[in-house]
Amino acid sequence: MHEFDDHDSIILCRSCDLAVRKRALPSSARAICPRCDTALYDSPYCSINGMLALCLAALIIFIPANLLPVLEIHFLGSIRTTTVVEAAVAVWAQGYWVVGLAVLVAAVIAPAVLILSILAQVMIVKLKLNRTFWQRVYTTLLKNQGLIAQMTMLEIYVISFLVSAFQLSDFSDVYFGMGTFSFTMLFVIILFLQREYNLEHMWSYVDEH
Amino acid sequence: MSTEHSAAADLPVDVVTSSHSSAQAHLQGNQLGLCLCPVCKKLNRTTNSHCRRCYSSLSTRNYASVQQSWALLVTATILLVLANVYPITLLTNRGVVTNDTIFSGISHLVQTGMIPIAIIVFTASILVPWLKIVGLATYLAAISFDLPISKRKLMVGFHIIEWIGRWSMLDLFVISLTVALVNMGQLLDAKPAPAATAFALVILLTQLAAKVLDTRLLWDRLEKTHDTN
């Protein structure tokens, strides 16, 4: 490991492989690659307790967001409601399982996995679980973090409430419910959680061992 | 994306330059015998076979990624044509069945006067997928055929494509909500149609095409005279 000491001040741009000398940044500043403008690193600020609080809040609001109806229409006396899961299952039941699966993953499964994954990471760091098993779990979670974050598309789903409501209002009365509110709150909490979360910082806990 | 971070100043950073040659020569990781772990982005020596932090296998460049990306992109283009030609929803209104393609759905929105919604749907369902395919094709062509396009501009475009690509999912979410709500038999009924699957696959394949591509390959080309910045 000694051979690396002289190289630890150098970082490489992940997009263009340019070698850049790393230096300390003032808080809330971000270093960008001088050649291709890709974000290189920011000053590590990542509050473990803050993330724990946001994870718990997200877990609680996740339940009504997925159990309560998010949209309701009244059409000639008949009332129809749907939850996010029911909407995905409805498309699946028509034989379009690719579409149903895509909706289910992006709006329900990926957000749930994201919350649980960050919660597990936070607990492992906070309780200093140094056993090999926990360290292996931690590394596996970090390796998949980027993929799960990319598959979480709550912000797009929130916009789709509005688009659907406008489209359906053409021929029926449309109502939002507590489910819509809960789902939007889930989106807001996860937005703040992802802003607080810093993957590079979480990896640095592995370096310390 | 986040207000606080975008408000913060983007600092320029010192570039490592070789001491004996001119100050213009930018050193890359592969010239220093260093590479980033593809999974956890830890700095490693190229002589190591596995990352010293997460034990993933290392490689300086992934040359096969250009071919993989081209293959995914060609498939996505074919599917995108199908997604635009075939109907995406099937609407039954008082016994009258109408097939809506992506485009006819938007023109219907324009006719009923919902211009802002029409713009959102147009952007998410037509503009973004086509921009993504044209943009990725330009990027890949610049690597494969050594086209004289500013690498810096290509990289900015690539980051935009990576970020905006997800928004195509909007149409699928709207379809799933509509199908679940509008099910009143002959009176009023909405069902998905074949283009929905094609469209879902377009999103998956184009996101994969951007994800597998090793962007560092673009920067290995010789610096062109017009490309100093």
Image (cartoon, helix red, strand yellow):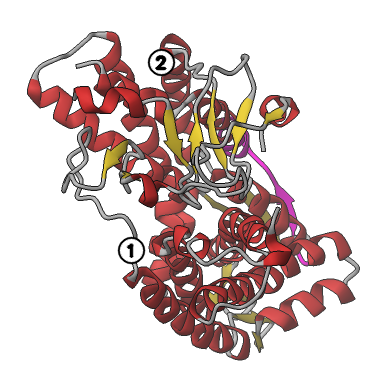
Q: Is residue A188 visible?
A: yes
| Total residue callouts | 2
Left or right relative to B174: residue B50: left
Give the image quarter of residue A59: top left
Given residues A132 and B103, the one toward you in this image is: A132
Given residues A102 and A127, the one toward you in this image is: A127
SS assignment at label 1: loop
Instruction: Work out which residue is located at the far front of the displayed protein and give it.
Output: B20
- In which quadrant will I find the N terminus of chain B? top right
Given residues A126 and B191, the one toward you in this image is: A126
Q: Is residue A109 visible?
A: no
Left or right relative to A104: residue B145: right
Q: Which mark is residue A52?
A: 2
- Alpha carbon of mark 1 to alpha carbon of mark 2: how far? 38 Å
Residue B29 position within the rendered picture, expressed as x and y whole percent measured from the top left:
40, 46
Amino acid type shown at disc 1: Asn
Residue B129 position within the rendered picture, expressed as x and y whole percent measured from the top left:
62, 72
Badge 2: chain ID: A
Given residues A166 and B94, the one toward you in this image is: A166
Asked if residue B39 is among those painted magenta in the image, a careful observer would answer no
Q: Is residue A46 above or below residue A97?
A: above
Residue at (41% x, 13% y) in the render:
A48
Whether labels 1 and 2 belong to a single chain: the reply is no
> Magenta span covers which residues?
A171-185
Residue at (18% x, 30% y) in the render:
A137
Judging by the rendered image, the residue that carries numbered circle 1 is B62
SS assignment at label 2: helix
Residue B101 position within the rendered picture, expressed as x and y whole percent measured from the top left:
65, 84
